[in-house]
Image (cartoon, rainbow, N blue to C red):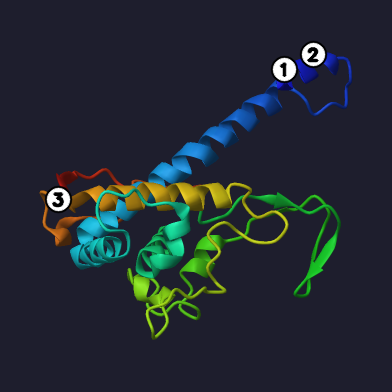
Amino acid sequence: SFLLKMAQEEQDPNTEITEKNLLMTVTYLLFSGTVTTSATVCYALLLLLKYPWVQERVHEELTQELGVGRAPSLGDRARLPYTDAVLHEVLRLQALVPMGVPHTLTRTTCFRGYTLPKGTEVFPLIGSVLHDPEFFEQPEEFNPGRFLDADGRFKKHEAFLPFSLGKRVCLGEGLVRAEVFLLFTAILQSFSLESPCPPGALSLKPVISGFANIPPAFQLQVRSR
């Protein structure tokens, strides 16, 4: 469809349907649709290796709520508050896109005493919010309990913004949340995760940290449950 439209508008000097924009669009789709989900699931598995008691509790909840032999579905999320809290804490701690995606001002704007001219690029520093000690106590610690209330029910957090916010929030948020939940729970439903390395030797430091935080490579052993 894009190529057909590009052929129709090739004589229009003002068209945005160009080969450059086609390349960038495909790149965004591939990155947003694959790298984000795979990196988040890998980071989640790495955290479970480093914190085996968290994995044990997820296993207990899955067994209690779903039993054996039934694949998890999106409708099960409300019945799995601890598992949901773990995934939220993974997204918070990872801060996959710490600088957010740049946005451009469509008009001159005054913000907190500063005048930002039309056309200014703005980077929402999502990582600074997700790791802000004012909102998350000991933000560098992996603590799924921060997303649970006193009764063990899942609770939302106003500073949880891994997908940005507002009208330009990530369009793929719903898809990523669904994919990560289904992949993560399906893996934990069927397997126990083990590492040939002691938990303390596992590093959580991203192997790439720039536009995105990509987790390091690690060895993973799986055992049927």
Q: Is residue 162 left or right of residue 166?
A: left
Give the crowd class for mark 2: few <14, some 14-19, many >=20 residues within 10 Å. few
**Circles 1 and 2 in contact, beta carbons < 8 Å:** yes
The CA span between labels 1 and 2 is: 6 Å
Residue 3 shows which numbered tag? 1
Badge 2 marks a residue whose secondary structure is: helix
Give the image quarter of residue 148: bottom left
Quadrant showing the N terminus: top right
The CA span between labels 3 and 1 is: 48 Å
**63 and 100: which one is in front?**
63
Give the crowd class for mark 3: few <14, some 14-19, many >=20 residues within 10 Å. some
Instruction: Determine the residue positioned at 19% across, 51% down.
Output: 193
User: What's the amino acid at mark 2?
Assistant: Ala
Instruction: Determine the residue positioned at 54% across, 47% down.
Output: 175
Give the crowd class for mark 1: few <14, some 14-19, many >=20 residues within 10 Å. few
Q: Is residue 138 left or right of residue 134?
A: left
The CA span between labels 2 and 3 is: 53 Å
Image coordinates of residue 96 in percent, x first then y, are 46, 53
Residue 91 visible in the picture? no
Badge 3 marks a residue whose secondary structure is: loop
Residue 195 shows which numbered tag? 3
Image coordinates of residue 41 in percent, x first then y, are 37, 48
**Circles 3 and 1 in contact, beta carbons < 8 Å:** no
Residue 33 shows which numbered tag? none
Instruction: Determine the residue positioned at 33% across, 68% down.
Output: 142
